[in-house]
Amino acid sequence: MSLAHLLVRHAGHAADRPAILHGDAVHATYAQWAARSAGLARQFRDAGLVPGDRVLLFMRNHPRYLEVMWGAWWAGLVVVPVNAKLHAREVEWIIDNAGARWGFVTSDIAPDALAGLERQVDIESPEADALLGAVPDPMAIPVTERALHDTAWLFYTSGTTGRPKGVMITHRNLMTMGLTYFVDVDAVSPEDAIVYAAPMSHGAGLYAVPHLMAGARHVVPASGGVEPAELFALGKAIGPLSTFAAPTIVKRLVDHAEQMGLSPEDAARSFKTIVYGGAPMYVADIQRALRVMGPRFVQIYGQGETPMVATALSRRHLADSAHPRYLDRIASVGIAQTPVQVRVTDEDGRDLPIGEIGEVLVKGDSVMSGYWRNEAATAAAIRDGWLFTGDVGCLDADGFLTLKDRSKDLIISGGSNIYPREVEEVLLTCPGVAEAAVVGAPDPEWGEVVVAFVVPAGGAQVTEAMLDQHCLEQIARFKRPKRYLLVEQLPKNNYGKVLKTELRARLT
């Protein structure tokens, strides 16, 4: 069963219903969406792409993102979504590793040709217009059937080695995620509207699946991103919005509501549901959000390896302020979502007693099939069907999971994962640098920011400006350090390992 059948279903019985909006203007009805995606699927087949081939999406948020995604699935292809903030060199590594044949881009983030693609299409070009030309009868173009265990979404997430790993997410994984949304996150009706303000290459884009299942509207704001005034106005114009947001985005929305003197009732006219996740949400911040905007928040915890599905902290739990353990609960990430089991274990995979801290494990139909072309990493991450998340937390007697840390060195800045080793490897290629260590420092806006401790080689003249320019030439801007601290030496243990705990302590 292909995810493309979700679109076929609604194109049949709700053909004229608005499906994709750009701002408050209808970009496509369900019939038009299906006709364009089916037309693109035919073009893929005519060009020689075969089921299982990979198609890269290196785009800012755009109404055509959904048309290309479902066109690829209609043709039995695999979508490779790429963070629009990545450097071209990083994207080219993904292209090579994934073996992507075609790529769809927006010219503002990919003005030049990306090495390794057979064909690169600017989504706003006449070429794209021709590829997405609607066919008169989309049902005359059969969906290429795929097994539920076939890969649909190949998502690249940084690994501890500094090289990204391709997470193979199957049709079953995404079907499970979509159906779980209605049980554990929120009810959805055809009158609802999900707005894609956060990147569609990540969790926000995945929530297209449940909203397509329900026949709801899919909205890309005119700005393509997070502009609080625009989003509040858009919700009032077309009906209350649902969205997925990192805590940094939630903070911006709450700041705007407070600055404008909006009441929770005013906020309800613009937003139905705000699902937050992807980074820690501090208790004080969610309390303020509830006070300013009212009961429209739900928290989810998941990973690229179990997309959007591990635990959920429901609207009901967030509203139950009379509960004796309320503060503990809103500091947690909630209880296991319906299709998965969650455990906390020691390093040998043995269950720990209630309240003890260990590694979080997840098992269920949302868990990836493995890492692309990386059997060793797959074997390390999935053991006896359990995903070893690398996250650290504890369970209480009621099943609420509280995360104590992410994976050992992971930095989460603005909802984006940054692995220090990747940045360290770049710094070590800068002339004059002998050693480098990267850690995260708490930040009120971004959650964490990247800080680099750099040891210059003997006699070398190294400046912050040199280091910053070098990073900008090698990695995505959002990964580069926000601070560079030049030091004579790095603290190390007897085995020569850098003591990052000590480095973090220097920043407090």
Image (tube, helix red, strand yellow):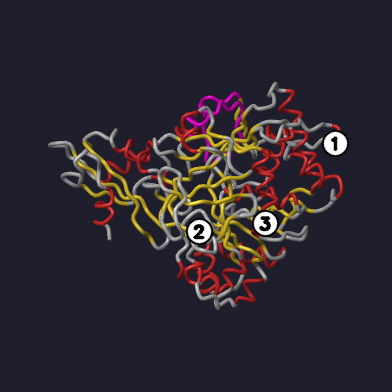
Say which element carries label 3.
strand
Pointer 1 residue: 139
Packing grade of label 2 (10 A; few <14, some 14-19, many >=20) is many
- Which of the two discs, 3 and 2, labels the residue nearer the N terminus? 3
In three-dimensional space, the C-alpha distance between marks 3 and 2, rounded to whole angstroms, equals 27 Å
Which region of the structure is painted magenta? 91-118
Pointer 3 residue: 194
Residue 483 x %, y % = 30, 51
Camera-side residue of 50 and 23: 50
Residue type at mark 2 is Leu
Splitting the image into 4 quarters, where does residue 443 fall? bottom left
Q: Which residue is rendered at x = 59% and y = 59% of the image?
A: 275
Residue 456 x %, y % = 19, 40
- As drawn, 40 above or below 261: above
Say which element carries label 1.
helix
Q: Which residue is rendered at x = 69% and y = 26% of the image?
A: 51
Camera-side residue of 92 and 343: 343
Is residue 342 something that shows in the picture?
A: yes
- Residue 401: image tag: 2
